[in-house]
Image (cartoon, helix red, strand yellow):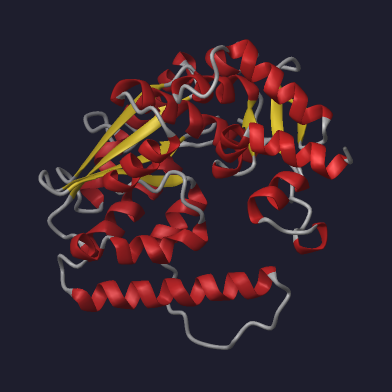
Amino acid sequence: MNQDKIKRALCETHADLLHIILYFGGFMLLAQLRALCLAFRLYASGQAVNRAVRELREADILNRKTWVDNNSDLLLARKYAYRFFGDATSQEVATPRRPSTMAPYIIQARKIDWLLDIIQRKGLTSLDAVDDYLARCGCTVFLRLPDLPGYYVNHYDIFTESGPEEFWEQADRLEVVTSWRASIARAEPVQKGEAGPPVTLELAHRRGVYIERIFPEKKAVRLALFAGLSTRPQRIMDWVIDAHMWLKTLMPQYRSIFAVYALSDAHKAALRAGLTGTAYNRQTPYFRARLVAAHLDGEVNIAVTNTDFISRWCGNIQPTTVF
């Protein structure tokens, strides 16, 4: 049997496992992949997942990169995995691009950590169930920038609370920006046109701020920020205010619940200290003073939560600024 046939047979045997990796961007921590495969009942044990991964690595379908603890494996899908799911030849599929730093890998691992908690709490037993749940919640945590125009349209009924004019103006601007980005990626000339001010939902995504859930019955939106060590309170409040002001343009009756996810107890304590410090005067916490100045007091709630990411997924190795 030639190599292509061997690879195809392995991809068919482990199609669900590979689909999970590709669905979440083409890379994943082995420990998180094991957790997902067991939650979805794809394999009988963690050892069975390890064996499957070993077979796929030996066949050059998966590759590995050492994780930040210098011990764990970060798995990366190689070109053949994309060929298999696209039913394409080698010439039709580009070699996957790899981030030049660990930062994108870390933020994706933090998102998967967040998702595993939801899977456990909600009893989700398949990737389809996860996809359905996130869509029903209006969640954007795993959406890519090109997905955002479709997200706008899918939430037309909610985003037109203030009327369709503002909605379509933002949706059209986002389509233009998305088209420009696609042209640049293909090294094609960019069509001249007026995109107008940037769409705040896209800016939020670029900053790492995502819609976690929309609560139409409560007139509330919960947003998530996976804060890093370099994320300062001033920046958090800038982003909180910008995100809420965007929401008000489409859903003026909604309030915001802003969840800031910390890496550890120490990180949580530092963030809380910065947000509740009395930088403006001795009575008013910093976060409230900023909200009052923006005329948003009472419209935004902020909560800092420790996810124990460093101890759970990084072997409790002390983080560096890459986090």
Question: In this image, 6 relative to 289: left or right?
Answer: right
Front residue (pair 75, 168): 75
Residue at point 58%, 25% (across, down): 33
Residue 303 location, quadrant: top left
Q: Is residue 92 above or below residue 214?
A: below
Residue 278 percent location from the top left of the image: 31, 30
Q: Residue furthest right?
A: 2
Residue 11 screen position, x and y as percent: 69, 38
Camera sees residue 130: yes
Q: Residue at x 78, y 59 (%)?
A: 89
In the rendered image, the vertical position of residue 35 relative to residue 22, given as above or below: above
Does any portion of residue 68 appear in the rendered image? Answer: no
- Specify the quadrant of the image occupied by residue 6: top right
225 vs 174: above or below: above
x, y (%) of residue 39? 45, 21
Q: Residue at the spot x=70%, y=72% of the render?
A: 186
Task: Give 18 or 224, whichever is nearer the viewer.
Answer: 18
Instruction: Provide residue 194's location: percent of width, then percent of height.
Output: 48, 85
Q: Residue at x 63, y 82 (%)?
A: 190
- The quarter of the picture where the N terminus appears is top right
